[in-house]
Amino acid sequence: MVELFGEVSALKQVVGEQREEIARLKGLKGRPSIRPSGMDKGTDPPRGGKPERRRGRGKVTPRVSIDDKVVEAEVPTGSRFKGYEPFLVQDLVISVRATCYQRQRWITPDGRTILAPLPEGITGHFGPELHRFVLMQYHQGQSTLPRLLALLRSVGVAISKRQLQRLLTDKREEFVAEAQAVLRAGLKTSPFVSVDDTGARHAGKNGFCTQIGNDWFTWFGTRSSKSRLNFLDLLRAGHTDYVLNDAAYRYMRMHSLPTTLITRLAAEPETRFADRAAWLAHLDRLGFAALTVTPDPVRVATEGALWGSVQAHDHLRDAVVLSDDAGQFDIGRHALCRVGGDVTAPTPHRPGRAGFPHPVLHERASLTAV
């Protein structure tokens, strides 16, 4: 039987060689020559020479303080003590601690009630360590809310789904401020930013998420509108003022606001308005709201004042806005982006959808996005 198996194996090899020769004579492609991968080299027997010395894992240095604990040994009488042999063990302890603060209440002689304040860091019925754990697991650990809820309940935390949702969303002004600081720094220092938006429905209402960023930063903002007014408001990065300056007036002229209305705005001494209510009151005082012409004077003037605010805060001073040619992104120095491939021929200079020129359309080939 062994001899038969050997003959069959030899015949299979001869048949394979003949098939390759026939294919070669017919001009057909033979079997591909596939080089072995790097993993196959590990199965080969080692060649001559000194074997490579495996590197050790190095010294283990815990990132927390180390508690020393002496472990005593039972030894016979007369033994000599020779010191200690260290053996480092790292462990994780997850436990739940509930504290009931008995807050003193006092009534003053004049009838006022004084209640002792809670310790620093206590906001609500969940402590700061639990807050930090929830935020870390959800944002850094990419844990879903149901899984995080199950984890907390399994270790003994009495918490509902709504309470957990509030820990993740309520009173997060510091995160909003940090996000605005990132956006402001990016808009002030970046030579270009790419922008895009996408829509979705939530709780029966339409919403739109706008992305602003480049290779160094990314920022997202969700609003109920995807208009140019909304985009200009996002570019203010949290500022609420409306500013009339050279950039604002230039924007208004580019978008066909009548010269008489621009002159009416420029004749007023006030050029900076704290918020939307103050700005709209100013336009109403100048008679803009009563006009029924095209384009809408209130809209164009508001867009111009928003663009003036963006420039006044040094946002997008000389930066290029890369977009997919959506009208709401046609702001300032605008260029088009492409996904994959290159732009072989630049588009000639042309006015924008609202008459605003594209001064850098010739730069699209060098700003192609992949």
Image (tube, grey):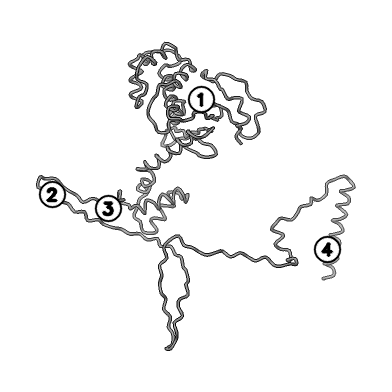
Give percent across and percent down for residue 123.
30, 48
The residue pinned by badge 2 equals 107
What is the crowding at mark 2: few (fewer than 14 residues within 10 Å), some, or many (at least 20)? few
Q: Residues within 10 Å of mark 4 (few under 14, many from 20)?
A: few
Q: What element carries label 4?
A: helix
Earlier residue among tags 4 and 1: 4
Q: Which of marks 3 and 4 is nearer the N terminus?
A: 4
Residue at which label 4 appears: 9
Task: Say whether disc 1 or disc 2 marks the residue closer to the N-terminus.
Answer: 2
Going 44% across and 20% down the picture, which residue do you hit?
A: 246
Q: What residue is pinned by disc 1? A: 332
Residue displayed at 42% across by 83% down = 74
Q: Tag 1 or tag 3, which sits nearer the N-term?
A: 3
> Which circle marks residue 119 in the picture?
3
Q: Which of marks 1 and 2 is in front?
A: 1
Q: Answer yes or no: do the residues labelled 3 and 1 have beta carbons within 8 Å?
A: no
Amino acid beneath label 2: Ile
| Residue 271 image offset from top left, x and y in percent | 37, 21
Q: Label 3 to label 2, Cα distance in Å? A: 21 Å
Q: In this view, does 74 lie above or below 3?
A: below
Q: Residue at the spot x=60%, y=34% of the render?
A: 369
Front residue of 159 and 188: 188
Q: Label 1 sits on what residue type?
A: Gly
How far apart are the two marked residues, 2 and 4, measured between alpha carbons? Answer: 102 Å
Q: Is residue 283 above or below residue 364?
A: above
237 or 135: nearer the viewer: 237
Of residues 337 and 95, the one nearer the viewer is: 337
